[in-house]
Amino acid sequence: MIDYIFTNETILSKISNQKLLVQAKIITELKNIAPSIENDQLLKIYDKSVSIRQGNMQGNGAFLENDIENFLSKNHIPFKKQVTINNKGIIIGFNYKKERCFHVIDFVIGLDICEGASITKFSVLSCKTTCRERWTQDEWTFRFPPKKYILITLSDDYPSSTRFKENVRRKIISCVSKKKDDRIYKLRFEDLRKELNLGVIRRLCKNKLE
């Protein structure tokens, strides 16, 4: 019986072979579109297209967050952006991404958002240009349920209602709906104002100032 060889060298060799296989597949696919272009140029075009796409995705994410920030600011909704919590659901800073960081939340809505406060006292907005499995980054919301958790996305690849455990405190907003949309609350971007209870928030802000 021959022992299975499992070393750094064999793994690196397999990685190299896999890379060659992927490149060969890319060249074959692109040759159908542009047969006159040399193989090395096709790979450069492919790499550049991937880079452009990734840049566009990051741009879409920035645009979405900027638009939500403008919406909150213009409607005088108290919020903090890029709020960091630890593994006990306690706010430990803002834009803080070091060793104690458990998760960074896109937007936290409410009054008196400060270090030491529990995230369960506030509402939360999580922005994802595309969801797929990325929404599972917010699984902390099951352990430390905020007053309201709203997943906001630009795509139709959000999770099913059952998997998301959708309820009155957990909702999804998307500008593109699934063909078979099983959401209980089929929310669009124009519903955000109502979901944040804008009137209630304004009254609380007014009472605090008085």
Image (cartoon, rainbow, N blue to C red):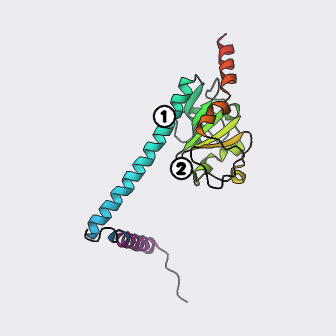
Q: Do the numbered discs 1 and 2 sit on residues whose CB atoms are within 8 Å? A: no
Magenta-colored span: 1-28
Tag shown at residue 75: none
Estimate the spatial distance between the alpha carbons at disc 1 and disc 2, rounded to whole Å: 16 Å
The amino acid type of the residue labelled 2 equals: Thr
The x and y percentages for residue 31 are: 32, 71
Q: Is residue 111 left or right of residue 94?
A: right
Q: Quadrant location of residue 194?
A: top right
The residue that appears at 54% across and 29% down in the rendered structure is 71
Residue bearing the label numbered 2 = 130
In the image, farthest residue toward the front: 179
Q: Nearer the viewer, residue 169 or 30?
A: 30
Q: Residue at x 70, y 31 (%)?
A: 121
Q: Which residue is mark 1?
A: 66
Residue situated furthest bottom in the rendering: 1
In this view of the protein, which residue sits in the foreground, 115 or 206? 206
Please state the horizontal and vertical placement of residue 106, each as a whole percent of the image. 56, 37
The amino acid type found where label 1 is placed reads: Asn
Q: Residues within 10 Å of mark 1 (few under 14, many from 20)?
A: few
Residue 157's place in the image compared with 61, above or below, is: below
Report the magenta stretch's main SS. helix
The residue most toward the top is 210
First in residue order: circle 1 vs circle 2: 1
Q: Quadrant of residue 91?
A: top right
